[in-house]
């Protein structure tokens, strides 16, 4: 498995619970307790209503490809990883995540394709959520 930190955001006070959960193979995102909006990327203020009344909710890990592109040529550190798929995956709970679709032929990816989360283990106990075709 390749390491493509497409949308990786830093571990900080707002995202620590997300990364701690990912290390346990759980997709956890904040949800606004006032308006119900589910938030990606993790923030301490709801982008819809500015509420700080958020709670962490476990996502199903299921969704569909909203949009995608296949990178077939690139330079630098990702050169040896082509072709790879960069996609927006819309979770069934609502938010869209910038991520990768993996474990399939890039030519078989399509908009609307059902996908499910998988976790790619990294150094220092970290794990990156990516998506693969649903079984
Ligand atoms: Zn809200």
Image (cartoon, rainbow, N blue to C red):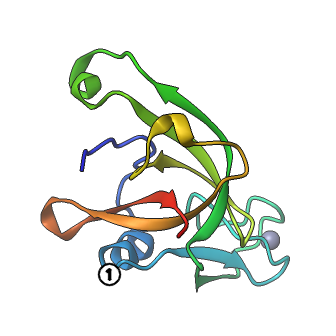
| 102 vs 33, nearest the viewer | 102
Residue bearing mark 1: 24
Q: Quadrant of ligand 1?
A: bottom right
| 98 vs 31, nearest the viewer | 98
Residue at x 34%, y 76% (from the top left corner): 20
Is any part of residue 14 visible from this angle? Answer: no
- From this view, report whether residue 52 is shown above or below residue 15: below
- 73 displayed left or right of 59: left
Q: Position of residue 70 (x, y in %)?
A: 51, 29
Q: Position of residue 55 (x, y in %)?
A: 62, 84
Residue at x 32%, y 41% (from the top left corner): 4
> Is the C-beta of the residue carrying label 1 under 8 Å from the nearest atom of ligand 1?
no
Q: Position of residue 112 (x, y in %)?
A: 73, 51
Give the quarter of the image for residue 130: bottom left
- From this view, report whether residue 97 is shown above or below residue 61: above
Residue at x 52%, y 34% (from the top left corner): 107
Mark 1, other Cα within 10 Å: few <14 / some 14–19 / many ≥20: few
Query: Which residue is farthest left?
Result: 124
Residue at x 66%, y 53% (from the top left corner): 113
Give the quarter of the image for residue 31: bottom right
Mark 1 residue element: loop
Is any part of residue 121 visible from this angle? Answer: yes
| 12 vs 130, nearest the viewer | 130
| 99 vs 32, nearest the viewer | 99
- 67 displayed left or right of 85: right
Q: Position of residue 127 (x, y in %)?
A: 29, 65
- 107 displayed left or right of 33: left
Q: How many marks?
A: 1
């Amino acid at each position: 498995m390749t390491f493509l930190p497409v949308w990786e955001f830093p571990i900080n006070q707002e995202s620590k619970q997300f990364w701690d959960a990912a290390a346990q193979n759980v997709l956890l995102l904040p949800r606004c307790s006032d308006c119900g909006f589910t938030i990606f990327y993790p923030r301490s203020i709801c982008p819809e209503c500015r509420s700080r009344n958020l709670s962490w909710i476990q996502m199903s890990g299921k969704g569909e490809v909203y949009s995608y592109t296949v990178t077939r040529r690139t330079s630098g550190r990702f050169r040896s990883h082509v072709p790879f798929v960069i996609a927006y995956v819309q979770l069934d709970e609502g938010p869209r995540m910038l991520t990768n679709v993996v474990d399939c032929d890039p030519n078989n990816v399509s908009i609307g394709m059902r996908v499910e989360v998988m976790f790619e283990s990294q150094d220092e106990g970290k794990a990156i959520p990516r998506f693969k075709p649903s079984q």
